[in-house]
Amino acid sequence: MQRLRDELLEVLQAVIPIVLVIVLLEIFVLRASPAELLHFLLGSGMVILGIALFLFGVKSGILPMGEAIGSELPARGSLTLVVIAVFLFGFFATVAEPDVRVLSNMVDTVSGGGIAQGPLIVVIGVSVGFFAAVGVLRIVAGVPIGYLFAAGYGLVLLLAFITPPAFLAVAFDAGGVTTGPLTVPVILALGAGVSRVLAGRSPITDGFGLIGLASIGPILGVMAMGVFFF
């Protein structure tokens, strides 16, 4: 219970200033009614409790399990198994990511169905899973992460010249929403677990960077979606 109280305190410290600013704006700018203020405060309370419970669950379950899986997979001696498992974790964590669903729903609504929600979610999920797997292969092979960043963002710059403007804007937002509260703990824990059991690999220098690589995936994936299918 002490850990849950600590998480609740941290969330309160982070959220209360935002709540106060919005309350002041609603009172002095929007002239909100007491009922509207009450609804907002009730919703804010649910958000605070929900985030605290989520963070508690992440630190109690997802992070330890992710590290355990990341540590155990290389011990099985099958690189193929490691790559497939990391791809699947990256894909399903991204598909379940609330930020990804918010973005895809907004894009579907604004485009009038021109960029459908379902295909967009699949493209983003596959892209994150693929680049997360590439990131783990980098840890195994000992390739400097700077090379992958240079190649990835170099390709982003090249595709930017031929990608339709609508997809270009969506692509960079897609790269941002994948760094959400569900995807990040899973991928970080896997990377730390894999690097910890490999001889000569540092959890700091080799275990991190997967999120940065995974964020390149949706940018390239959505750009390619616009170039080849629209």
Image (tube, helix red, strand yellow):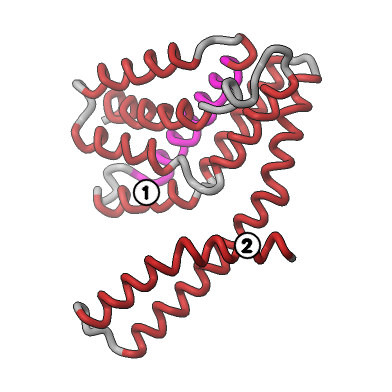
Q: Which residue is mark 1?
A: 103
Question: Residue at 64% across / 62% down in the picture?
Answer: 6
Q: Nearer the viewer, residue 188 or 223?
A: 188
Task: Name the kind of residue labelled 2 in the image.
Answer: Leu
Name the dominant secondary structure of the magenta segment. helix
- Direction from residue 116 to residue 190 in the image, left or right: right
Image location of residue 150, percent across then percent down: 37, 15
Question: Residue at 58% across / 65% down in the picture?
Answer: 9
Question: Residue at 26% across / 82% down in the picture?
Answer: 27
Task: Name the kind of residue labelled 1 in the image.
Answer: Leu
Decide: few, some or many residues near mark 2? Use Cα within 10 Å; few <14, some 14-19, many ≥20.
some
Query: Is residue 92 in the magenta section?
Result: no
> Distance of mark 2 from mark 1, alpha carbons?
24 Å
Element on which disc 2 rests: helix
Magenta highlight range: 116-138
- Direction from residue 126 to residue 74 in the image, left or right: right
Q: Nearer the viewer, residue 204 or 63?
A: 204
Element on which disc 1 rests: helix
Query: Is residue 126 in the magenta section?
Result: yes
**Quadrant of the snapshot with the N terminus:** bottom right
Image location of residue 156, percent across then percent down: 31, 22
Image location of residue 73, percent across then percent down: 75, 24
Q: Return the disc, 2 or 1, that comes first in the chain's sequence.
A: 2
Question: Residue at 31% across / 16% down in the picture?
Answer: 154
Image location of residue 168, percent across then percent down: 25, 33
Q: Which residue is mark 2?
A: 53
